[in-house]
Amino acid sequence: MGLTRVLLIALVVWLALVFIRRQLGQMRRRPEQAQARLVRCARCGIYLPESETKPDANQARICAHH
Ligand SMILES: [Zn+2]
């Protein structure tokens, strides 16, 4: 009976740690997504992530599909 209770407490503590770690991981990931820099396309004027743009002849950022 005592062992069952210890195992139950250990399980609850483990689940709590897993839950807290997951919450912390989500909190850390959110600012990175917010930091994805948006740049304005010099040709069509829409805003999109810098990784989806390329430089044109004048070194301005334009959409990758132009
Ligand atoms: Zn464009």
Image: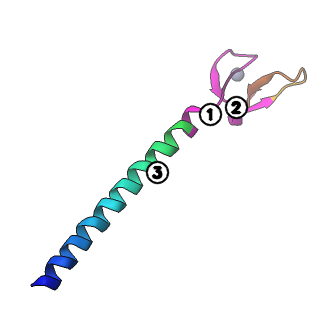
Question: Where does ligand 1 appear, by image quarter?
Answer: top right
Question: Residue 25's mark?
Answer: 3
Judge whether 21 appears above or below 35 on screen: below
Which residue, given by chain and number where applicable, does mark 2 sit on? 50
Is the N terminus in the top left, top right, bottom left or bottom right quadrant? bottom left
- The span from disc 2 to disc 3 (Cα, nearest Å) is 25 Å
Binning the other alpha carbons within 10 Å of mark 1 as few (below 14), some (14 to 19) or many (20 upward) gives few
- The span from disc 3 to disc 1 (Cα, nearest Å) is 18 Å
**Residue shown at the point (29%, 64%) measured from the top left:** 15
Q: Nearer the viewer, mark 3 or mark 1?
A: 3
Question: Earlier along the polypeptide chain: callout 2 or callout 3?
Answer: 3
Residue type at the position of mark 3 = Gly
The kind of secondary structure element at disc 3 is helix
**Percent from the top left, x then y, of residue 7?**
21, 78
Contact check, label 2 and label 1, Cβ < 8 Å: yes
Contact check, label 3 and label 1, Cβ < 8 Å: no
**Percent from the top left, x then y, of residue 11?**
25, 71
Hey, which quadrant is residue 34 in on the image? top right
Magenta range: 32-54
**Percent from the top left, x then y, of residue 51?**
70, 36
Question: Earlier along the polypeptide chain: callout 2 or callout 1?
Answer: 1
Q: Is residue 53 magenta?
A: yes
**Residue shown at the point (76%, 17%) measured from the top left:** 42
Question: Residue 36's mark?
Answer: 1
Q: Is residue 27 magenta?
A: no
